[in-house]
Image (cartoon, rainbow, N blue to C red):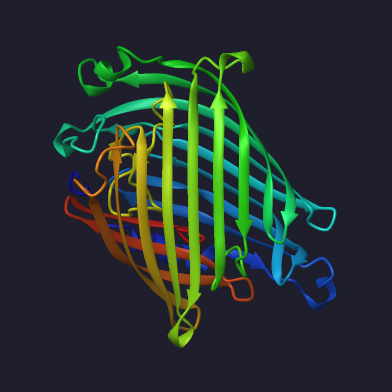
Amino acid sequence: MTKLKGKVLFIAIFLFFCTVSGEEPTAEDKENDLGYVVFPIAFYSSDTSLGFGASAVLFKDHHEIKGVVKSNSFATVLFYTLRNQFLNANVGNVYWDNANWHWRGKLLISKYPTDFYGIGINSNKNHREVFEPFSFEFENDIQYRLFGPLYGGLTFVQGYYKLLKMEDDGLAKDYFATQKKEGFISGIGVKLNYDSRDDSFFPSKGLLLEATYRYFLPALGSRFEFSYYELDLRGYISTFFNSVLALQLYFNAVDGKAPLSILPALGSQDLLRGYPAGRYRDNIYLAGQSELRFPIWWRFGGVFFFGAGKVQEELTQFFFKDLKVAGGFGLRFQMIRSRKINFRFDMGFTPEGFSFYFNLLEAF
């Protein structure tokens, strides 16, 4: 990983604490139980340079299934960086018919110059170059409650991907010599979701399982044809002194010719923190992580985390060879005490270097 080009803007964190706004439900509004939190974003990292924008979460408790609260919610984030990176992400959740039905929608628009190191677990960090993709993606999931907190249903994804820029001679040019540079994607599939967590923002007990299969095919208007698999399993255990042990196992794979932006990638602000985004890419990605979350004082909390994983071309390859590891620590600030909505700052360390992150809500 390249050396950081400056210092963390700790003053941005201070300004965040001074300018964040939120609203907790009043006694008169308990029937609606409506709340929101809004905050500005200012940050600096090796992946983004200086960035700024805003984020917001709107939530409303609506249904309760065997002690598990299902919240109607909408979250949005918008930011721009001096690396000319632009991203707008919007996610909504709606429950109705006594939470027997659930709709989840996600709209993502980005023009995001991205570091590229090549394909495979043995890519060289010193061969980093940049390619610039534009992506538009709209996802819709319609699910029905099968029993308890288990939902199942259909998932639909439509979008558009285009390569805007790459270096004249390098790894990206070699890769795209045999791959499509742009086109529509359109896919349909099935999704299962089991969520027994006691809180969707800061769970202290319960399980979350999401299993997804999608097939992108020309009959639906997709220029790219491939299968997409994703499995996300998370567990939460209350421990000593109001601490929480969080565990996650993640699997992601593609079979076919997928856009580079969809290809499974190791390294992010949520999983294997410390590796730059997209540090390793290949057809298959398997990783796990644990995190200990504990209170410190007033609205402040802390975490310690550790993870391991790898990417590989074939499922039959030996997983524990060339395994990548990452770990670190973080601070939390609880913006709305009753809802445990946290602002987080994390430092992740790897054998290749370190990275830092700050964002709204937990990593997982």
Q: How far across and how far down the image is residue 87, in percent?
A: 49, 38
Work out whether 222 lies above or below 363.
above
**Relative depth, front residue between 92 and 112:** 92
Q: How far across and how far down the image is residue 25, in percent?
A: 74, 71
Most extreme residue toward the front, as rendered? 316
Residue occupying image coordinates x 31% and y 43%:
47
Q: Quadrant of residue 285?
A: top left
Report if residue 231 is visible in the image.
yes
**Relative depth, front residue between 257 and 348:** 257
Work out whether 134 lies above or below 82.
above
Q: Quadrant of residue 98?
A: bottom right
Q: How far across and how far down the image is residue 188, in percent?
A: 62, 29
Quadrant where the N terminus sits is: top left
**Relative depth, front residue between 64 and 261:** 64
Q: Quadrant of residue 109?
A: top right
Residue occupying image coordinates x 79% and y 53%:
100
Work out whether 190 lies above or below 151.
above
Residue occupying image coordinates x 60% and y 76%:
337
Report if residue 6 is visible in the image.
no
Q: How far across and how far down the image is residue 172, in percent?
A: 27, 22
Work out whether 216 lies above or below 17.
above
Instruction: Locate residue 101 relative to residue 224 in the image: left or right.
Output: right
Residue occupying image coordinates x 30% and y 57%:
8
Q: How many marks?
A: 0
